Image (cartoon, rainbow, N blue to C red):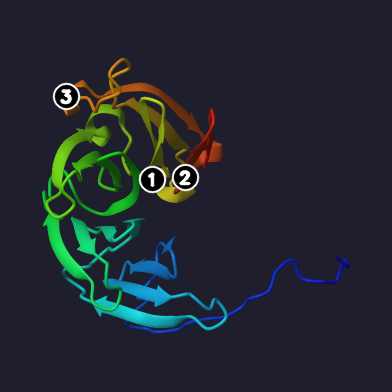
């Protein structure tokens, strides 16, 4: 490639103010992209032709979908994090069905990142909690555990979570550097070392915390091998 050639080019742009209200995340499954918006939106986009994407379905609800910040897709099921945890049947992308939601304003609100292992979805809630949801019946998910990271360990604004062995890996941007505080990453033991089953929440324990200026603004985390990329 010549030095003056661009590294990449924009193949297409899809604009819709109602469908994409402050878009915050995207997940792909087959021919579809699922896009939540912090302004209270959720959109399903047909990307079978990436050069000509088309809006298949959308909903704008500034109350029910307020702070829609993250999605997790598993075949015909979409899990959506807002101030609640939503389970949505997307077997027909043109007419998704909101089958259930889990609400608990003390322990669940402003879900910003999620990760799944087996029948458990972990969610980082920006008001200081790490939540676990049982999705063994995806039509009726239930809160399986919740840990107050803010009160117990000054992990004030958990923004994302991934898994490493028996641990949940949680990142906290700590004001995105605006207040001079360093960011943090924490490992929380959530699975039993022998049985590999989810521990009761009252047995979840912090295994370690790293606090450093380089982590200010830590908004996303993904684990690969023994490394966490933040």
- Residue 202 location, x and y as percent? 16, 24
Whether residue 107 is visible, yes or no, is yes
User: Nearest the camera: 80 or 194?
Assistant: 194
- The local secondary structure at tag 1 comes to strand
Single out the mark in the foreground, 2 or 1. 1
Residue shown at 17%/26% (left/top)?
200
- Give the image quarter of residue 163: top left
User: Against 193, is 174 above or below?
Assistant: below
Please give left or right for residue 176 compared with residue 84 in the image: right
Q: Please name whichever residue, 115 or 93, is drawn nearer the observer in this view of the structure.
A: 93
Q: Earlier in the sequence, mark 3 or mark 1?
A: 1
Side (left or right) of 12 relative to 22: right
Mark toward the start of the polypeptide (2 vs 1): 1
Tag 2, which secondary structure? Answer: loop
Look at discs 3 and 2 and give the one toward the viewer.
3
Left-right relation of 131 to 226: left
For disc 2, the neighbor class at 10 Å (few under 14, some 14 to 19, many from 20) is many
Instruction: Indicate the quadrant containing the N terminus: top left, top right, bottom left or bottom right.
Output: bottom right
Q: CA distance from mark 3 to mark 1?
A: 21 Å
Marker disc for residue 218: 2
Q: Are marks 2 and 1 in contact (CB under 8 Å)?
A: yes
Q: Quick one: 74 or 23, which is closer to the camera?
A: 74
Find disc 1 in the rendering and name its residue. Answer: 160
Q: CA distance from mark 3 to mark 2?
A: 26 Å
How far apart are the alpha carbons under marks 2 and 1? 9 Å
**Mark identifier at residue 202:** 3
Q: Position of residue 2 (x, y in %)?
A: 88, 68
Mark sitting on residue 21 = none
């Amino acid at each position: 490639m010549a030095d003056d050639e661009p590294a990449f080019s924009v193949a297409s742009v899809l604009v819709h103010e109602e469908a994409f209200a402050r878009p915050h995340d995207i997940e792909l499954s087959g021919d579809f992209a699922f896009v939540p918006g912090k302004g209270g939106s959720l959109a399903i986009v047909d990307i079978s032709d990436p050069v000509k994407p088309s809006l298949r379905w959308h909903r704008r609800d500034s109350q029910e979908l307020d702070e829609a910040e993250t999605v997790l897709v598993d075949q015909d099921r979409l899990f959506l994090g807002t101030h609640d945890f939503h389970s949505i049947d997307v077997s027909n992308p043109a007419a998704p069905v909101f089958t259930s939601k889990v609400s608990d304003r003390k322990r669940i609100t402003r879900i910003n990142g999620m990760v799944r292992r087996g029948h458990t979805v972990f969610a980082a809630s920006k008001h200081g909690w790490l939540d676990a949801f049982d999705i063994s019946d995806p039509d009726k998910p239930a809160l399986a555990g919740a840990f107050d990271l803010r009160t117990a360990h000054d992990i004030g604004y958990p923004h994302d979570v991934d898994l490493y062995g028996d641990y949940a890996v949680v990142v906290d941007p700590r004001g995105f550097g605006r207040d001079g505080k360093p960011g943090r990453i924490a490992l929380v033991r959530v699975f039993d070392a022998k049985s590999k089953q989810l521990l009761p929440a009252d047995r979840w324990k912090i295994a370690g915390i790293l606090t450093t200026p380089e982590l200010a603004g830590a908004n996303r985390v993904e684990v690969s091998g023994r490394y966490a990329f933040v």
